[in-house]
Amino acid sequence: MSKPRALVIDDEPDICELLSLTLGRMGIETDVAGDVKGAKNRLAARSYDLCLTDMRLPDGDGLELVAWMQSKAPGVPVAVITAHGNIETAVQALKLGAFDFVSKPLDLQNLRNIVESALKLDDANGHPEARLLGKSAAMQQLREMIDRVARSQAPVHISGESGTGKELVARLIHDSGPRKDGPFVPVNCGAIPSELMESEFFGHRKGSFTGAVSDKTGLVQSANNGTLFLDEIADLPLAMQVKLLRVIQEQSVRPVGSSKEESVNVRFLSATHQDLGKLVRSGNFREDLYYRINVIELHVPALRERSDDILQLADHILERLSGSKNRLDESAKSALLRYAFPGNVRELENLLERAVTLCRDGTIRADDLAFRLGGSQTPPLHERPLSDLGDQLEGVQRQAIIDALDRARYNKTAAAKILGLTFRQLRYRIKKLGIE
């Protein structure tokens, strides 16, 4: 096999020589261009596996070249070299389609990580985004965006209501990109007590605090060479937001009780069902962190916004739950299509799981589907017999607790916080409603 080839674009001979030597030791052949015009001529004349460009060039800038390459050389991953601390320009380059960025003075280990990830892009095939079911226009657009952002190393923020599948989207971005062989580490930010958050994220050294009986590896380090998915990032305390911002920018962490920083190579994905922009305006989320994690935003549509997919999803879920033993009759299909699904795909799964248990002869009818309050299938309270109200209200409480436990990954302390209850109140209600 021929060696991979890179194009280095910089008007400083020392930088070009350093990059050429570094890439050469990695078995990569290098061509050099000193300006935008020369780079375009070389990109038009032959194919490259990687492009590294400085931001400031004699006849233009790197941003212009990045934008040009998206249509003229779309298969070539391009990383930009920025002045130290110029995060705004780096973020702009990522939005235009740059694969990644490296700051001056050059950190050669960071540069090698970027180059290795770029060279893995051609091997990141298989398109696992096919697991994201749905033929609606909204889902087709989402799958296309996943395919595009998977090739980048830019932070991605995934927005959408609870139950829409934000973690699935994050996993697909990871599995479709060059980090697919590395770890995918999901963490629910709302499920970690604030006093343990720094230790959980960054790790700690033995003896650094009471109870630290041994060294502990943090979540960030566990995601090294892979992806860290920060679910419900809006729940992070402001003090932790400052520390996370530094980790994202510097790609290094300092464990609690350690005097040394550890370099990491991590891609950050985040998600929340809350409106981060609104939280920024109210002062509950840092604006600088918001812009750093929200370089690219993906919105996962609510189920009611893609009603064309409901029956396909239902058939897929039933197949997973029971093989081909259960089917929906026309009344059930009609009921599902009329329902608003406040709990989205997660609620659809819960509905069908219950219906499989209750249905007769393997046929699920409309009466077997226990819809939540607030959906279009549920009659208002004043129209129900009084004898039904107790059961209905218990059902609402049960579903609210199950949803909170699910969000908190079954951490009862965190679930109680979500519900506005004390731990003892939640434990009492779990026992009373027979949830456990």
Image (cartoon, grey):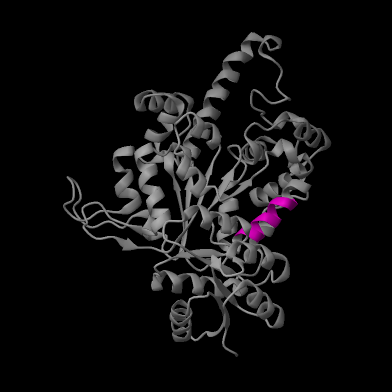
Which x, y percent locates residue 338?
78, 30
Outermost front residue = 58
Which x, y percent locates residue 421?
40, 24
Nearer the observer, 198 or 393: 198
> Can you tell which quarter of the image residue 97 is in?
bottom right
Nearer the observer, 65 or 361: 65
Does the magenta-highlighted stretch encompass residue 336?
A: no
Does the magenta-highlighted stretch encompass residue 143?
A: yes
Q: Which residues are magenta?
A: 140-149
Which x, y percent locates residue 254?
29, 56
Classify 334 as above or below 6: above
> Can you tell which quarter of the image residue 191 is in?
top left
Nearer the observer, 272 or 2: 2
Classify 388 as above or below 281: above
Q: Is residue 85 left or right of residue 197?
A: right
Which x, y percent locates residue 205?
22, 56
Q: Where's the C terminus, which quadrant?
A: top left
Q: Residue at x 54, y 57 (%)?
A: 154
Q: Where's the N terminus, which quadrant?
A: bottom right
Nearer the observer, 323 or 174: 174
Q: Is residue 144 visible?
A: yes
Q: What secondary structure is the stretch in magenta mostly built from?
A: helix
Classify 301 as above or below 47: above
The image shows a total of numbered marks equal to 0
Q: Residue at x 17, y 45 (%)?
A: 210
Classify 431 as above or below 120: above
